[in-house]
Image: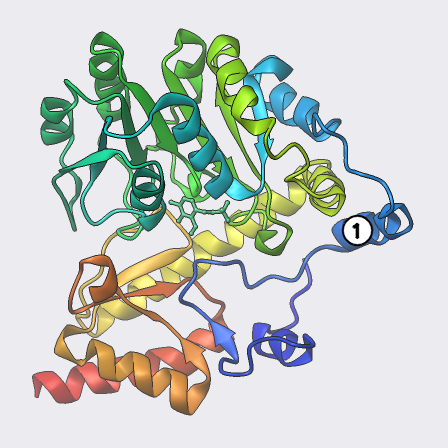
Amino acid sequence: MDTTSPATWYAREPGHDRRFRVRLSLSESLLRPTTAVTAALAAEIDRVNLYPDIECEPLRGTIALGLGLSAESVIVSNGSDEALLLAGLATVGRGDRVLLPERTYTGFGYVADALGTDPVLSECGLGGMDVEDFRRKLPGARLAFVANPHNPTGRCLPPGGISAIYRQARDHGCVLVVDEAYAEFAGSHFESAMPLVEGGGIIVTRTFSKAHGLAGLRCGFLAAEPGLAARVARTRRAIPFSVSRFALAGVKAALDRPNDLASAVTRNTSDRARMMADLNSVSIDHVESDTNFLLANLGSTTPAMALHLHEHHGITIRDAATLGYPHWARIGVCGRRLWSEVFPLLAARHHSCNA
Ligand SMILES: Cc1ncc(COP(=O)(O)O)c(C=O)c1O
């Protein structure tokens, strides 16, 4: 992994948004792409006159093999956002009931809204999603969305939570979509829904934007039992080349080097632990995270803090009031150097507010 500081990287990137120096507000990776990825991208330049492979091979086969699924079970998409939209397009229409947790990843609501559905919200707070409330509200829903680990809290569902939700959804004929965008970052207590895919009635989405650090390539995928995947594939015929040849080549190169992913995850885990320990040391409350971001309670100073970091340091953090969590900020996990710039500011502001 290239260890050039993110600040240097952004400053060098031509045409980037000059209003920020480093962005900790979008749960992106701060690591530069590996040379294996950049070489694969460079090799595609001479082929831009040609459409990418319509079935997204050989990437699709590589993903399926890694998951122990058939290639027919995997659909590669333009980020997992496209996978979520395809899942919705294939399963619901105007007026259908769609269940999603409140204060969750905004993409679920956008899909429900774009398709003219009737959204129903289940309870969700800092402690994570209320599994029982979600299960109670499943009857009558045709589609349900869950993020595990969750954004913006960063928490995983409790043990047994995902299988309990799946059983209830299947009993009521509701297709369950489980968004696992942050799966790679999660600890050993994380229970992936991938093993449930073959049972049918479930779509699991993943992305290469987060742990693989390839957000700009726009690539993700969904996994579903072949019959359900074929329904999704029919909707995808309307946008057959949505995944670019750069995305296919760059992601394939990344998957061929699993050690790079492992080291990025290890780094995230140790950076996240350092950040949580520092926040603890000055009694800034935060949610135990399984992702590449932290939700921290900066109190009523949150909007001012976010503004100060942005205007005076060129660093963006997310005021989580816009996500339904007033007084909390979502801060991307970052390395020691950047954190040593951000943390003293958070600590000083917190101290002066509580003095
Ligand atoms: C829970 C969750 N799902 C999906 C996405 C979208 O990711 P992608 O870049 O794959 O479209 C995000 C991005 O922040 C996310 O937080």
Pick out the residue farthest to the right.
46
The quadrant in which the N terminus is found is: bottom right
From this view, report whether residue 61 is shown above or below residue 306: above
Q: Position of residue 172 (x, y in %)?
A: 20, 11
From this view, report whether residue 341 is shown above or below residue 64: below
The kind of residue on which mark 1 rests is: Leu
Frontmost residue, 336 versus 113:
113
Residue lying at 55% horizontally and 20% vertically, measured from the top left: 234
Q: Position of residue 38 (x, y in %)?
A: 78, 55
Q: Position of residue 136 (x, y in %)?
A: 9, 23
Q: Which residue is mark 1?
A: 41
5 displayed left or right of 167:
right
Residue lying at 46% horizontally and 84% vertically, measured from the top left: 314
Find residue 307 and report its image quarter: bottom left
From this view, report whether residue 26 is shown above or below residue 298: above
Residue lying at 22% horizontally and 25% vertically, measured from the top left: 161
